[in-house]
Image (spheres, rainbow, N blue to C red):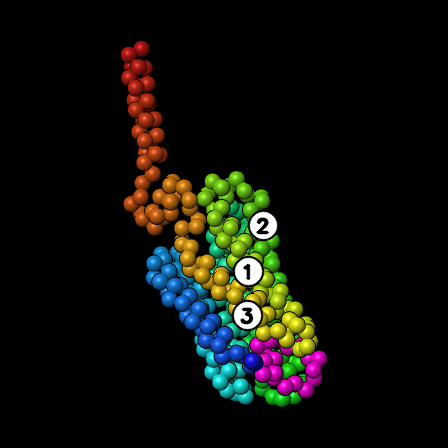
């Protein structure tokens, strides 16, 4: 079993990952599982066009940070007193969280861009850059919590952890609310654009991340003796498993084809970068109008 991490104050709020050194068996299991998602998303990244590749790169990078984080957890489990391994493990697990948020942010932009001229990427500039900022704040928590044995340093780290958790929860909740708003307001246009599947993906993904962040908020505001921090399965059940399910889901579905379901929209999407693409239906209409005009002129001459 995992061993308790000593603290100068038993009532200091601590998350499971910092209160206890990890169990080797579960760390190895999740290293293998997250390592599988690395291969899956690397394959997806190679298949994507430039338009969708950046979102796939974010997901691929996130799988790498999670895999490396659990590799260091395995090493930490073998050397429970190593502060360096604890810090590096927490940095990978906390610092890389913004990557998956950025990928969902890009999917959200792809949803709203065809729907509204009012809300554009520059209006969401702050949200885009708050994700990495809250990850940096989480990294400060990972370092501060282990830099010394003093309760003061640990309390400072806990404050950073609270800010990071609340910030991510707020931003993810905002994306979920805005997705719901646009799904209701533009439901007919979404259906015509073939974006219904994109709505479903955004709902599923943001709900999983929101579940994880609610757990993190609860753990950061709970004491070390509360079950949310004391029970080992809580960390894996509410943090590792939702991320794993999300990565497998986004790796299994073809994200690049979520945006156009009808044949007409698919043709437009495939030819959006082709300068030689011609709308034949428009040309046919023009030719017909020209022919009718010529016939009318001939009739006028006869009269």
Q: Are marks 2 and 1 in contact (CB under 8 Å)?
A: no
Mark sitting earlier along the chain (2/1)? 2
What is the magenta range? 3-20
The residue depicted at 28 percent of the width and 17 percent of the height is: 298
Residue 128 percent across, percent down from the top left: 53, 62
Of the two numbered discs 1 and 3 in the rendering, the one whose residue sits closer to the viewer: 3
Of the two numbered discs 3 and 2 in the rendering, the one whose residue sits closer to the viewer: 3
Q: Quadrant of residue 38?
A: bottom left
* Mark 2 surroundings: few (<14), some (14-19) or many (≥20) residues within 10 A: some
Compare residues 60 and 26 and report the one nearer the observer.
26
The residue depicted at 47 percent of the width and 48 percent of the height is: 197
Disc 1 marks which residue? 208
Mark sitting earlier along the chain (3/2)? 2
Disc 2 marks which residue? 180
Lateral position of residue 112 relative to residue 13, left or right? left
Lateral position of residue 98 relative to residue 39, left or right? right
Whether 20 is drawn above or below 60: the answer is below
Q: Specify the farthest residue to the front.
A: 1
Compare residues 29 and 45 and report the one nearer the observer.
29
Residue 199 percent across, percent down from the top left: 51, 50
Residue 43 percent across, percent down from the top left: 35, 62
């Amino acid at each position: 079993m995992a061993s308790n991490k000593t603290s100068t104050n038993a009532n200091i709020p601590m998350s499971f990952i910092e209160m206890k050194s990890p169990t080797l068996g579960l760390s190895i299991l999740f290293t293998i599982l997250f390592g599988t998602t690395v291969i899956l998303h690397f394959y997806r990244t190679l298949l994507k066009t430039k338009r969708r590749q950046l979102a796939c790169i974010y997901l691929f990078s996130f799988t790498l940070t999670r895999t490396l984080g659990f590799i260091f957890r395995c090493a930490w489990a073998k050397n429970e007193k190593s502060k360096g391994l604890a810090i590096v493990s927490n940095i990978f697990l906390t610092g890389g969280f913004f990557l998956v948020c950025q990928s969902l942010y890009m999917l959200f932009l792809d949803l709203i861009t065809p729907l509204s001229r009012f809300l554009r990427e520059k209006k969401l500039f702050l949200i885009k850059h708050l994700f990495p900022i809250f990850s940096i704040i989480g990294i400060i928590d990972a370092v501060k919590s282990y830099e010394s044995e003093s309760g003061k340093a640990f309390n400072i780290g806990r404050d950073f952890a609270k800010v990071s958790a609340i910030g991510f929860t707020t931003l993810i909740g905002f994306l979920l609310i805005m997705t719901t708003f646009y799904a209701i307001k533009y439901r007919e246009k979404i259906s015509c654009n073939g974006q219904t599947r994109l709505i479903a993906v955004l709902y599923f993904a943001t709900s999983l991340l929101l579940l994880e962040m609610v757990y993190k908020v609860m753990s950061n505001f709970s004491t070390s003796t509360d079950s949310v921090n004391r029970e080992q399965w809580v960390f894996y059940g509410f943090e590792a498993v939702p991320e794993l399910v999300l990565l497998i889901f986004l790796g299994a579905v073809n994200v690049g084809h979520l945006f156009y379901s009808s044949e007409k929209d698919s043709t437009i999407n495939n030819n959006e970068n082709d300068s030689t693409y011609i709308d034949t239906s428009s040309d046919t209409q023009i030719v017909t109008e020209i022919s009718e005009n010529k016939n009318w002129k001939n009739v006028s001459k006869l009269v």
